[in-house]
Image: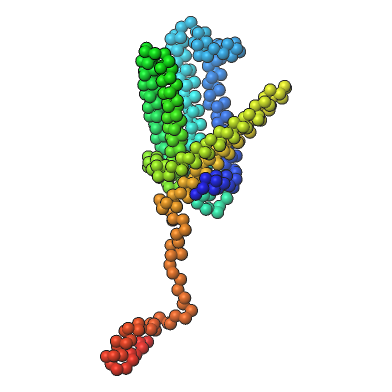
Amino acid sequence: MKFTEAIKNGIATINRNWQLILVQIGAMFVSFVAFFILVVPPLAIAFIIFGLDLTELLKELSGLGSILGSFHRPSEFLSKYFGLVVLVLASILIYLFAVLALGIFVLGGSIGVISRSIKGSAEEFSMKTFFAEGKRLFIPLVGFTTVIGLMFIVLAFVLGLFGGLIAAIVSLAREREAILALFLGIFFSSILFLVWLIMILGAFAVTLYGTAAIALDRTGPVKSVQTSCRYLYRHPQAFYLYCIVFGGCIIISFMLFSMGYPLKSVPLIGPLFAMFFQFTMYISQSYLGLATLATIFWYYVKTSIEMGEGGIPEGAPTSEDSRPEKDISDSPAHGQEDAPPEKETREQGLSGKPPERRL
């Protein structure tokens, strides 16, 4: 399957299911309201009890140090207001978990609707289908995000080891010659950046094709990662497609940002333009993200079918078409079929007369 065909099919799929963008906007609004419900009241109570001057604190903008510096004895303060501190931290954690769960549910419903559209389902978009797919894919996506998170932690640890090794080599070279140390620093930093870029892009590609395996093949979290890695190894072009689509999304987002950024400097109505611009940017990024998912899903399905890795190979007959059609218009009745020519000759030679027909 060509890259242009996959991109066109992905965009057409999102255009048919444009309601998914409204769902993304609704999820953003729910997250915004949840912040004011779960996080703002405990913080407001904390500021009232602490007796802090919030206006002066915002003017200073000196971070956590100014907050702790406003108390003479932080340990005494923590022991006195320990319950309130726990309440604030608990509200923040609950908000983060709620937003994460909402995001996973919305992602599950979105990829479920996209997978149904790719499979050729004739039904139109409905919230009932969205919620059904969200429930079906919620638990697998929770496990999948956990596995992917561990994978990113391992990648960060490996890159940290490489960075420390490079720093040690540059430090040893600096003791001998400064020019050599400068050259080695630039050289190894360029290599480290290239390795970092490839590893990050590869990890994101594994993530996207893994979600395709979960939604389309109904695999588990660990098996979906294995399937994604095996698929990318057999189809390097799939990684190239992801890089092209990812780069295109970055370029389009940068162009939109460059076009709308000067509007913020307009006198009086600049803040209003800024709010409208941020909302437009969120809609465009949601559309680009969904189009990327649909493109990856289309390419995954088509290439898997063409290589016989799942489904029916392209161009092969289905189970209904594989049975040869029989022309029954001139066929004799049951039990009156003509005997084979060889059998008739053999019976006629033994008896001297042609064999009788059995009714």
Residue farthest to the left?
350
Total of numbered circles in the picture?
0
Image coords of residue 106 (percent x, y): 52, 38
Q: Is 287 placed above or below 184 here?
A: below
Q: Report the coloring of the rendering.
A: rainbow
Image coords of residue 88 (percent x, y): 49, 20
Relative placement, left or right, of 145 versus 130 is: left
Residue 209's image quarter?
Answer: top left
Q: Is 228 placed above or below 85 here?
A: below
Q: Is 74 placed above or below 216 here?
A: above
Relative placement, left or right, of 136 versus 273 is: left
- Mark yes or no: residue 111 visible: no
Q: Nearer the viewer, residue 354 or 107?
A: 354
Residue farthest to the top?
72
Residue name at image x 47 percent, y 76 percent: 327
Residue name at image x 55 percent, y 54 percent: 122
Q: Is 195 placed above or below 22 here?
A: above
Residue name at image x 45 percent, y 15 percent: 82
Image coords of residue 9 (percent x, y): 55, 48
Where, quadrant-wise, is the C terminus in this rendering? bottom left
Residue farthest to the bottom?
352
